């Protein structure tokens, strides 16, 4: 297993990872009546090809096993959220007819935000998620900011993974109209 920075060639993988991470319900909500889950995946893939979005390949690490991608972690500097997110808002409007501009901020400017963590089916249970978190935490440490994330209060498996990685409860905040736990990894 190895972890490497993503490249523009990973855009389709990143789009798939984002839809896996947000789940079927949110993906279907984004798609609405006139679009499909594949359209939503393509939207995120198009954002991953760019250098100026939160879903950019520049913000992404890819885990590989025997040269094949098996996991993705996207994390970005919260200080750039508003500027980066404008591209998502515009693309959602143009490609899906969705106005996302009322969305709450998922992070704060003083942290690196772990936005997406996804391990592909068939590769789960091997510790790759934890390895991706550790590699992302090292990136955050080098940037001099704590690593933060949001997790649904009822998502016990994810909370257990994050606790194992060292994350601690920081506060709670609404996201997508759901009150979530905001966790942070203390800086060393």
Image: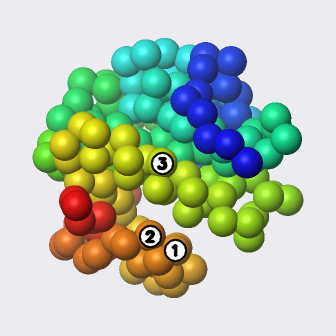
Residue 73 x, y percent position in the rendering: 53, 46
Counting other residues with Cα less than 10 Å from the Cα at mark 2, is it few (<14), some (14-19), or many (20 or more)? Answer: some
Residue, x 65% and y 58% (percent of image)? 128
Tell me the element at label 2: helix
**Viewer-proximal residue among 82 and 62:** 62
Confirm or deny contact between disc 2 and disc 1 (CB under 8 A): yes
- Whether residue 152 is visible: no
Q: As displayed, is residue 52 above or below residue 106?
A: above
Residue 135's tag is: 3
Tell me the element at label 1: helix
Residue 182 x, y percent position in the rendering: 28, 67
Q: Which quadrant holds residue 129? A: bottom right
**Viewer-proximal residue among 181 and 179:** 181
Residue, x 51% and y 34% (percent of image)? 60
Report the residue marked by disc 2. 165
Tell me the element at label 3: helix
Spatial CA distance of label 3 from label 1 is 15 Å
Spatial CA distance of label 2 from label 1 is 6 Å
Q: How many marks?
A: 3
Report the residue marked by disc 1. 161
Looking at the image, is mark 3 or mark 1 earlier in the sequence? 3
């Amino acid at each position: 297993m190895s972890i490497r920075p993503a490249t523009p060639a990973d855009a389709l993988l990143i789009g798939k990872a984002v839809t896996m991470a947000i789940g079927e319900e949110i993906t279907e909500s984004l798609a609405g009546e006139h679009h499909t889950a594949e359209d939503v995946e393509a939207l995120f893939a198009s954002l991953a090809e760019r250098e100026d979005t939160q879903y950019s390949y520049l913000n992404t690490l890819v885990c590989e096993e025997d040269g094949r991608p098996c996991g993705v972690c996207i994390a970005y500097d919260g200080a750039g959220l508003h500027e980066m997110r404008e591209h998502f808002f515009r693309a959602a409007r143009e490609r899906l007819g969705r106005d996302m501009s009322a969305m709450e901020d998922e992070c704060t400017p003083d942290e690196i935000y772990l936005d997406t963590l996804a391990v592909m089916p068939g590769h789960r249970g091997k510790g790759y998620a934890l390895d991706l978190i550790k590699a992302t935490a090292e990136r955050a440490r080098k940037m001099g900011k704590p690593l933060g994330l949001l997790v649904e209060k009822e998502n016990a498996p994810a909370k257990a993974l994050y606790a194992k990685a060292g994350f601690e409860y920081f506060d709670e905040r609404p996201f997508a109209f759901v009150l979530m736990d905001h966790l942070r990894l203390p800086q060393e």
